[in-house]
Image: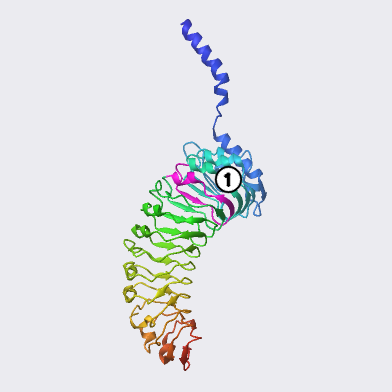
C-alpha cells in the first residue's frame, strides 16, 4: 500500500509540471478562437458578427457555424459573401475539429496564418476572392486530409510550396489569378493519385510543363494558361484518359503539336493552345479527340493545310485558327459538322472560295471570321440563311458582292 501512495504522489507532482504544459482543448477553446476571429474584423456591413457572435450565447447557434452533435465542437465555419474586411486571426488554428473553412468572396487582407497547419481534420479550405497577400504557408504540406484548396483571385506571391504536392488526398487545387512565381516540380503527380482539377492560370509561373502530369490519372481539368511556361508540350499528356479540359494558352511554348496528344484523351472537350510559339502542322491524329467541342490554336506559327480528318470531329463547336501560317483551300469542302458555331480562320494564307451551301452545312453558325486571307469569288447569297450569325468578318480578301442579313 505504501508503494501505491508513493506512486500516486509522484504522478500528482509530475502532472503539476509536465501535464500543465499540454493545452486543454475544449469547447471553450472554440469560443475563444471564434471571438478572436471576430476581433480582427474591421468591417461587418450586415452586422452579422457584431450582433450574433456574442459571448455568453451558445456559439453553435451563431451564424456561419456548424457544430458536431456529439462533442459540440466547430466542424464548419462558413462566412462566404458577407462583405467582411479584416485579417485572419491565428487563433482559427485552434478549431481542432474544423473540417471546412470558408471565408471566400470577402475583403480579407494580410497573410494566411501558419497556425492553420493545426487543422489536421480539414478537408476544404476556401479563401478565394479576397485580398490576401504574402506566400502560401509551406506548413500547408501537413494538412494531410485536405481535399480542396481554393485560393484564387487574391494577391499571393512567391513559389507554390512543394510540400502540398505530397498530399495524396487532394482532389482540387485552384490558385488562379495570383502573382505566384517559380516553377512546378518535375515530379508533381508522383503523390497526387486523386487529383481531378488543377488550376494555376494567370500567374507568373515558368519553366517546363512537367511530363509527370501524365501520372495524375484521375485529372479531368488542367489549366496552366496565362503564365510563362516554356519548352514543348509533353506528349504524355495524351495518356490522360479522363482529361476533359486542357488549357495551355498564352505561354511561350515551342515545338509542334504532339502527334499522340489524342492518344487516349477520348473525353477531351476543350483544347486551348492559343498564343504560344507553336510551329509545325496539325497532326491528322487530332481527330482521335472524338469528344472535342472547342479547339483553339490561334496566334501561333502553325503552317500547312488543315487535315481532312478534322471533318470527322462531329462534336466540334468552336474552331479558332486565327493568325497562323495555314495554306491551302478553305476547309469547308470537308466540313460537314453541323454542330459548328464559331469558325475563326482569319490572318492566314487560305485560298479558295466560300461554298454556296455554307449555311446549309452549318445551320448553327454564330461567328465567322476569315478576314486577311486570299479568298476569292462572290459572297454566297445563302449566307442570310445563317439565322444565328451575329459576327462576320470577310475583309481583306478578294470577295465580290454583298450579303443581306436575315431580319426575321
In the shown orientation, is residue 166 left or right of residue 160?
left
Task: Out of 358 and 348, give the one closest to the viewer.
Answer: 348
Q: Residue lying at the far bottom in this picture: please name it.
A: 401
Q: Residue lying at the far top in this picture: please name it.
A: 2
Above/below status of 373 relative to 81? below
Secondary structure category for the residue under label 1: loop
Task: Out of 362 and 17, give the one closest to the viewer.
Answer: 362
| Highlighted range, magenta | 143-167
Tell me where residue 344 appears, x and y as whole percent. Answer: 45, 77
- Residue at 43 percent across and 55 percent down: it is 197
Task: Out of 97 and 317, give the one closest to the viewer.
Answer: 317
- Total count of labels: 1
- Residue at 31 percent across and 67 percent down: it is 288
- Residue at 53 percent across and 60 percent down: it is 202
Tell me where residue 116 appears, x and y as whole percent. Answer: 55, 41
Above/below status of 182 relative to 274? above
- What colouring method underlies this structural image? rainbow
Q: Visible in this render: residue 403?
A: no
Tell me where residue 33 appears, x and y as whole percent. Answer: 59, 39
Q: Visible in this render: residue 270?
A: yes
In the shown orientation, is residue 242 left or right of residue 159?
left
Residue neighbourhood size for the residue with mark 1, other residues' Cα within 10 Å, grouped as few (<14), some (14–19), many (≥20)? some
In the shown orientation, is residue 74 left or right of residue 321?
right
The quadrant holding residue 287 is: bottom left
* Residue position for label 1: 62
In the shown orientation, is residue 97 left or right of residue 283?
right
Tell me where residue 314 appears, x and y as whole percent. Answer: 33, 73
- The reply to whether the magenta stretch includes residue 99 is no
Amino acid at each position: 500500500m505504501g508503494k501505491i501512495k508513493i506512486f500516486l504522489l509522484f504522478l500528482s507532482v509530475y502532472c503539476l509540471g509536465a501535464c500543465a504544459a499540454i493545452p486543454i482543448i475544449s469547447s471553450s477553446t472554440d469560443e475563444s478562437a471564434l471571438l478572436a476571429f471576430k476581433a480582427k474584423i474591421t468591417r461587418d456591413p450586415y452586422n452579422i458578427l457584431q450582433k450574433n457572435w456574442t459571448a455568453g450565447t451558445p456559439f453553435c447557434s451563431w451564424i456561419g457555424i456548424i457544430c458536431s452533435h456529439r462533442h459540440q465542437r466547430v466542424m464548419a465555419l462558413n462566412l462566404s459573401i458577407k462583405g467582411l474586411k479584416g485579417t485572419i486571426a491565428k487563433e482559427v488554428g485552434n478549431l481542432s475539429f474544423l473540417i471546412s473553412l470558408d471565408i471566400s468572396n470577402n475583403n480579407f487582407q494580410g497573410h494566411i496564418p501558419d497556425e492553420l497547419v493545426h487543422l489536421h481534420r480539414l478537408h476544404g479550405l476556401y479563401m478565394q476572392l479576397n485580398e490576401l497577400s504574402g506566400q502560401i504557408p509551406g506548413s500547408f504540406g501537413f494538412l494531410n486530409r485536405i481535399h480542396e484548396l481554393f485560393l484564387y483571385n487574391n494577391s499571393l506571391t512567391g513559389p507554390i510550396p512543394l510540400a502540398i504536392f505530397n498530399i495524396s488526398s487532394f482532389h482540387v487545387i485552384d490558385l488562379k489569378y495570383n502573382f505566384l512565381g517559380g516553377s512546378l516540380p518535375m515530379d508533381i503527380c508522383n503523390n497526387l493519385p486523386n487529383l481531378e482539377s488543377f488550376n494555376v492560370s494567370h500567374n507568373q509561373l515558368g519553366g517546363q510543363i512537367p511530363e509527370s502530369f501524365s501520372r495524375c490519372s484521375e485529372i479531368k481539368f488542367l489549366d496552366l494558361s496565362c503564365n510563362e511556361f516554356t519548352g514543348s508540350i509533353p506528349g504524355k499528356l495524351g495518356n490522360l484518359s479522363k482529361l476533359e479540359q486542357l488549357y495551355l494558352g498564352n505561354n511561350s511554348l515551342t515545338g509542334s503539336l504532339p502527334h499522340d496528344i489524342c492518344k487516349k484523351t477520348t473525353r477531351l472537350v476543350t483544347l486551348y493552345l492559343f498564343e504560344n510559339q507553336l510551329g509545325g502542322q496539325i497532326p491528322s491524329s487530332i481527330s482521335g479527340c472524338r469528344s472535342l467541342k472547342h479547339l483553339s490554336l490561334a496566334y501561333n506559327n502553325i503552317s500547312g493545310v488543315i487535315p481532312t480528318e478534322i471533318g470527322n470531329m462531329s462534336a466540334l463547336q468552336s474552331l479558332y485558327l486565327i493568325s497562323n501560317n495555314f495554306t491551302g483551300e478553305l476547309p469547308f469542302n470537308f466540313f460537314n459538322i453541323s454542330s459548328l458555331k464559331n469558325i475563326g480562320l482569319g490572318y492566314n494564307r487560305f485560298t479558295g472560295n466560300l461554298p454556296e451551301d455554307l449555311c446549309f452545312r452549318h445551320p448553327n453558325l454564330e461567328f465567322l471570321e476569315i478576314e486577311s486571307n486570299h479568298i476569292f469569288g462572290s459572297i454566297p447569297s445563302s449566307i442570310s440563311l445563317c439565322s444565328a450569325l451575329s459576327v462576320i468578318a470577310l475583309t481583306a480578301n478578294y470577295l465580290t458582292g454583298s450579303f443581306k442579313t436575315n431580319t426575321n
